[in-house]
Amino acid sequence: MSQNPNQMSEIITENENDFPDLPPFPNDVPTAPLLQLSLQKLLAGDATELDRLFQASVDIGFFYLDIRDCDLGTSLQKDADSLFDVGKTLFELSLEEKKKYDFSAQNSYFGYKGQGVSVVDKAGNLDRNEFYNASKDDIFDISDPLPAPEILQANRPLLKSFMTSSHQIVTLLLGILNTKLGLKPNTLPSLHRLTSKSGDQVRWIKAPVQPISDSRVALGQHTDFGSVTVLLNRVGGLQVQMPITGEWVYVRPLPGRAIINLGDAMVKFTNGLLRSNIHRVNAPPGLQAGVTRYSLVYFARPEDDIVLRRLDGEGIPGLKSGEVEEEICSKEWIIRRALGRRVDLGREIDYEKSAGTEEMSRRIKA
Ligand SMILES: O=C(O)CCC(=O)C(=O)O
Ligand SMILES: [Fe+2]
């Protein structure tokens, strides 16, 4: 494995079947050569690992995090395994029951999102996956509890444990980036306090097996809305658009590794220095095309009232002369992005208006 922080990538090849209960991820599709960072080394403050984290955040904003080698990581993995099972049971509820927990008409993106209710591209094609979003504030009793199915009520302690570990990892990463960016100590973590109101959430995703005749993506290309995303994948399908070339490549799911990516807030805080890379979910490749795809995500976002604009740090590029940033707070930004492409809310859809920081993050050479 490369220890050179200036090298963006290293090739990941795992030849054995990584997840024995699933058909193997094929070895003949292009995959993203993401850096693999060790959670244990980051916790220990290993200087090379801290450099590599910063480099991955500048270069692509996506990396693997090895969670096998420390208590925080193994606790996250154990909770995630249990939550995968919870998600399967949750999505097995009848559509009628699940729709009771769609709160989008109340301007909330928490709860259930049915399949095919959002557009995935300018042409108006519809998504092909279901979501269930569980709010961190609800689970931590910071906000009024939302109605939820029995399976979620029964698993509040598990959700709390998973959210706590995920948030601890996010805080660690933010603290390291804070130092590298030359911000005043604790600036980034203090914008993401666990017990303050925010749009942080756990998301379960289910995408059904896709008929060969259907070439739509399951989840359209996007950047994440918030700060740091912790993603647990088992089945392939996630694709990132490579910087510079614009090529779409799969992210190979690896056991014991979370996939971490940065979102729009980090781009705005750093005036484009850190990347929120464009990604999407396509049909799983090879033999995996025959299985239902589940994934589990923790989204960390800035606290609700934080304005998403450049922070003042020595390492953060200045604004162009005369440039005025949009004045939008975290909560509004997430609602605009999460609900702006829904076709079932009786609102006009403006695809461009609900976009994220794609243009700032893209860096594709024509
Ligand atoms: O399911 C995945 O692998 C990625 C999901 C994702 O990008 C999202 O929910 O924002
Ligand atoms: Fe995403």
Image (tube, rainbow, N blue to C red):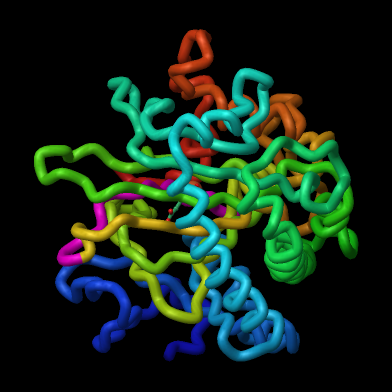
**Image point (40%, 76%), residue name:** 254
Q: In this view, does 136 lie above or below 349?
A: below
Q: Is the magenta stretch mostly helix, strand or loop?
A: loop
Residue farthest to the left, as pictured: 213
**Image point (62%, 56%), residue name:** 298
Total labels drawn? 0
Image quadrant holding the N terminus, namely bottom left
Image quadrant holding the C terminus, namely top left
Magenta highlight range: 274-287
Q: Where is residue 265 in the image (x, y as percent from the top left)?
A: 67, 44
Whether residue 117 is visible to the viewer of this picture, yes or no, is yes
Q: Is residue 181 above or below residue 78?
A: above
**Image point (77%, 63%), residue name:** 178
- State the residue in front, 189 or 212: 212
Q: Position of residue 345 (x, y in %)?
A: 52, 15
334 to the left or right of 131: right
- Rendering quarter of residue 170: bottom right
Whether residue 180 is visible to the viewer of this picture, yes or no, is no
**Image point (75%, 25%), residue name:** 327
Q: Is residue 314 above or below residue 119?
A: below
Q: Position of residue 149 (x, y in %)?
A: 62, 44
- Rendering quarter of residue 220: top left
Q: Where is residue 330 in the image (x, y as percent from the top left)?
A: 73, 36
- Rendering quarter of residue 228: bottom right
Q: Does the magenta stretch include residue 365?
A: no
184 to the left or right of 316: right
16 to the left or right of 257: left
